[in-house]
Image (cartoon, rainbow, N blue to C red):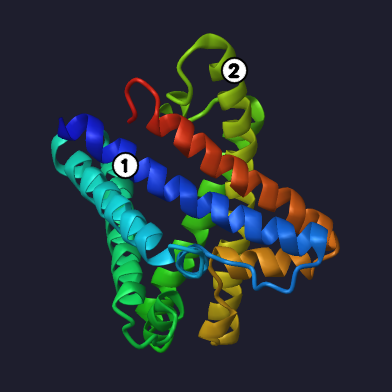
Amino acid sequence: MVRHVLPRVGYSAVGLLYATIGVVAARIAFLGAKDRAAGMDGSLAVLFRQQEGRTILAVVAGGLACFAAWRLIQTFTFQGDFITRVGWAITAIGYAALTWTAIGLLLRFPRGENFERMGVGMLLPSPLGRGALRLAAAILIVVGVVAIFQGVTGRLPRWLRAAGQRRPLKKVALRIARFGLSARGVVGIVMGWLLLKAVATFNPRVAKEIGGSLKFLSDSAGGPILMGVVALGLLSYGLAMWAVAFSRRPA
C-alpha cells in the first residue's frame, strides 16, 4: 500500500510545483507578464493565491510530506549505492523543509529570510563553510551536466524511465521527460555557478534558487527567449513527474 501511495501522491505534488514554476516563467518570457519568476517557495505562494488556494496548498503540503517520507524510506530500506542513498536523504530533507514552508503559508507564519540564503550566510564566515559551499556548488554543476547529458542522449534515470504506461503514450512521455530533465540540468548549473559567485564575493544574496536562476537567464545574452525555453522545459519536467506518478511502478 505504502509502496504505491506515497510516491504517486508525492510525484503529483512535486510535478505541480515544477509545472507552476514553468507556467509563471513562460508568461514572463513570452507574454511580458509582470510576475516575479517563482522558485519552489514562490510556486507555493502562487498556488496559495489561486481560487481555493488554501485547499490546493493543503493538498500539496500533504503530497510533499508523502514524497519526503518516501525518499526517507528508500534511504534506509531500498538497495542502492552510498551516493544514491545520500541523494535520497538530501531530497527527503529538502522536501520536508518545503512541506514546512507550505504549512507556514497556510498558518500565516511570519516570513523570514530565504532559507537558502540564510544557510549560505551562516556558512560564509567559516573557511570550512566556504569549502562546503564550493563542494555543494560543484555537485550542482556536475549533476546539471549529467542531467543535460541524460536528456540529450535519452539515457534517463531509472525513476524517470517509468513515465508513461502504454507504448504510444510512453514514447511521448519520455520525450517530454528528456526535454524537462535537460532544462532542470541548465537550472542546476546556473544555481551552482551563482553559489560559487556568492562565495567569491562573500555575498549570500548572490545565491539563487530556481526562480532567481531563471531571472539570471532572462538577464543574460539569450534574454527572455532562453528563459522561455527553460521555462517550457520545467513545465515539461512537471508533466513528466505526473506521468511517473501514474505509471505502473513509480520509483
The residue positioned 51% from the left and 65% from the top of the image is 50
The residue positioned 17% from the left and 42% from the top of the image is 73
Residue 219 in percent (x, y) is at: 78, 70
Evaluate whether residue 148 shows in this view. no
Q: In the displayed structure, does residue 134 sit left or right of residue 101?
A: right
Vertically, is 60 above or below 97? Answer: above
Which mark, residue 9?
1
Tell me which amino acid carries mark 1.
Val
Nearer the camera: disc 2 or disc 1 = 1
Q: Earlier in the sequence, mark 2 or mark 1?
A: 1
Residue at the extreme top: 167
Quadrant that contains the N terminus: top left
Towards the viewer: 161 or 170? 170
Quadrant that contains the C terminus: top left
Evaluate whether residue 191 shows in this view. yes
The residue positioned 26% from the left and 54% from the top of the image is 65
Circle 2 sits on which residue? 171
Residue 172 in percent (x, y) is at: 62, 22
Tell me which amino acid carries mark 2.
Lys
Vertically, is 102 above or below 118? Answer: above
The residue positioned 39% from the left and 58% from the top of the image is 56
Between the C-alphas of marks 2 and 1, the distance is: 23 Å
Residue 47 in percent (x, y) is at: 48, 63
Residue 227 in percent (x, y) is at: 74, 58
SS for callout 1 = helix
SS for callout 2 = helix
